[in-house]
Image: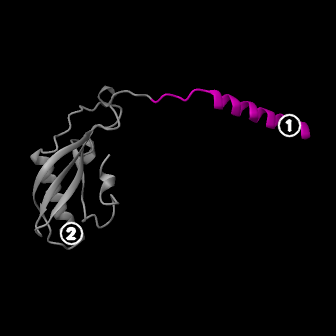
Amino acid sequence: MRSLVVAGAFAGAVLASLLAGAPAVARDDVRAEDRFLAFSGNVPACDDPRVLRRIANRFAFREAHFWQSPLTIEGFERVRDVALRPWGDAFIPRRFCTAVSQISDGRKRVVHYSVREALGPIGIGSDVQWCVVGLDRHLSFAPACRAALP
């Protein structure tokens, strides 16, 4: 019995040394556009009116239906890109943006958002994920909407 334990320990030590010396397996860095179900890589711009309208409409819906609040986004200013495909070409194409929104209560608040390819309804079209700083009541992107950025 003792020889079996010693043999098992020896085999474990040999296996551990082999695994420690083995090179790490490289990740498959195939561009998202070159996959079987390819992406186009064309992500709408940060200031695309459809993107901004989608954010404003979803914000108004969420405020009215979940928080019983009359707040709406009246407009956007200082819209700018933060990053385009920050994790490389092997990932789903995303554009990260930030803007200043005019809220119906008279305050200006920063909005962080990302436009993502093929993540719309049932995987068709682009979609927008957003967070208004100071109005992330369910803390989805806490702290202070920083989790909405890359």
Marks counted in the figure total 2
Q: Left or right: 140 with respect to 80?
A: right
Instruction: Identify the colour scheme used.
Output: one colour
Q: Residue at x 65, y 32 (%)?
A: 20
Percent position of residue 76, x then y: 11, 54
Amino acid at circle 1: Val
Identify the secondary structure beneath mark 1: helix
- Residue identified by numbered label 1: 6
Boundaries of the magenta span:
1-27
Instruction: Let me know if residue 22 is in the magenta part.
Output: yes
Identify the secondary structure beneath mark 2: helix
Question: Which corner quadrant holds the N terminus?
Answer: top right
Do the CB atoms of the residues marked 2 and 1 lie less than 8 Å apart?
no
Percent position of residue 7, x then y: 84, 34
Label number found at residue 71: none
Would you place residue 149 above or below residue 66 in this image? above
Q: Left or right: 58 with respect to 27?
A: left
CA–CA distance in space, label 2 to label 1 = 67 Å
- Residue identified by numbered label 2: 65
Amino acid at circle 2: His
